[in-house]
């Protein structure tokens, strides 16, 4: 991953992708991303009575988990389609349409700002951290997860290897925090945004599936596979299914896809 994409190029690409994935996200990627939520909430010190902002909330699973801990939460996302899912799944939670780089909240409103697997999709992650600091009160916590080094992402790797085998693949736009494996880069970013006591660690999570259908549905939306010729699509799916067999034990697929968990104090 060497190309640098402009922030606007990233924003435009990510908006199209997640809006396309929204309908089936909860049953596809959401199954995997939810695995990181308990550790994320612990890193942000979320307990009863906290006031929390969930950025890039998607269908709202992290916000839902915050509410279960007895806290008040607001979720924001820039995709109308994702917010429709969030409101349907969590009707008691407030969700707002907004960009992570421009948070529509007053200074010092929150005890914690969290973001689960969204910050590497941002064209301007520094701007998000500056905004997160602004809306936190002194002593408040920021915590976010991003995907770990791509070579460790066995679950995503199944799809990308199959795509490379069968189709011409170009590097797609991605934010500057996708594929960063140097933990110092995160410490530096947080320090530059005015945070202290930063912590960065890898967290082992896995995509747990009873069949590969939901995995393939997720990537079908993500990669807009409907646009590919049917034979090509079938060949990619067959490759994925074959490679996934290595991860099947006692009728369940457990495919590792670790994250980096980052947190700091304002
Ligand atoms: C991979 S999904 C993660 C969703 C959810 N947090 C989860 O745990 O599954 C990334 C989400 O970030 C949102 N997103 C990406 N860029 C954004 C931006 N600049 N501002 C607000 N939301 C953004 C997308 O619309 C999408 O819902």
Image: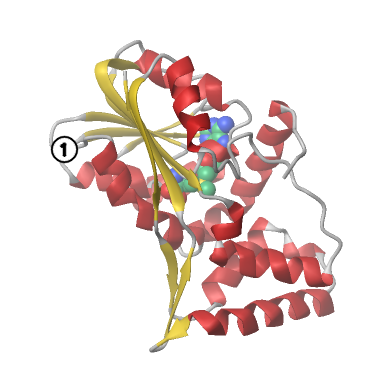
Foreground pick, 113 / 87: 113
SS class of the residue under badge 1? loop
Foreground pick, 144 / 216: 144
Tag 1: Cα neighbours inside 10 Å, few (<14), some, or many (≥20)?
A: some
Check the picture and name the quadrant holding the N terminus: top right
Residue found at x 82% / y 75%: 232
Expressed as whole percent of the image width and height from the top left, the position of residue 87 reads: 39, 45
Left-right relation of 56 to 47: right
Foreground pick, 81 / 150: 150
Quadrant for residue 9, please give it: top right
Check the picture and name the quadrant holding the C terminus: top left
Residue found at x 64% / y 84%: 242
Quadrant for residue 116, please give it: top left
Residue found at x 51% / y 41%: 118
Does residue 80 appear in the picture of this structure? no
Does residue 32 appear in the picture of this structure? yes
Residue linked to disc 1: 47
Foreground pick, 234 / 22: 234
């Amino acid at each position: 991953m060497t190309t640098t994409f402009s922030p606007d190029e990233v924003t435009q690409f990510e908006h199209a992708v997640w809006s396309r994935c929204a309908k089936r996200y909860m049953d596809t990627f959401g199954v995997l991303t939810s695995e990181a939520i308990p550790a994320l909430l612990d890193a942000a010190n979320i307990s009863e009575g906290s006031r929390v902002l969930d950025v890039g909330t998607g269908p709202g699973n992290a916000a839902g988990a915050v509410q279960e801990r007895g806290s008040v939460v607001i979720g924001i996302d820039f995709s109308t389609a994702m917010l429709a899912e969030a409101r349907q799944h969590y009707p008691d939670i407030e969700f707002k349409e907004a960009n992570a780089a421009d948070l529509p909240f007053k200074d010092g409103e929150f005890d914690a700002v969290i973001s689960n697997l969204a910050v590497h999709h941002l064209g301007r992650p520094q701007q998000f951290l500056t905004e997160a600091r602004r809306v936190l009160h002194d002593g408040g916590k920021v915590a976010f997860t991003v995907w770990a080094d791509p070579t460790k992402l066995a679950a995503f790797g199944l799809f990308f290897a199959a795509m490379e085998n069968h189709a011409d693949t170009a590097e797609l736009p991605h934010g500057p925090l996708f594929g960063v494996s140097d933990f110092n880069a995160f410490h530096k970013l947080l320090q530059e945004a005015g945070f202290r006591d930063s912590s960065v660690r890898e967290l082992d999570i896995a995509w747990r599936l009873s069949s590969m259908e939901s995995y393939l549905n997720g990537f079908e939306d993500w990669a807009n596979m409907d646009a590919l010729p049917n034979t090509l699509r079938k060949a990619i799916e067959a490759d994925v299914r074959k490679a996934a067999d290595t991860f099947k034990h006692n009728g369940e697929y457990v495919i590792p896809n670790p994250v980096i968990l980052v947190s700091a104090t304002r």
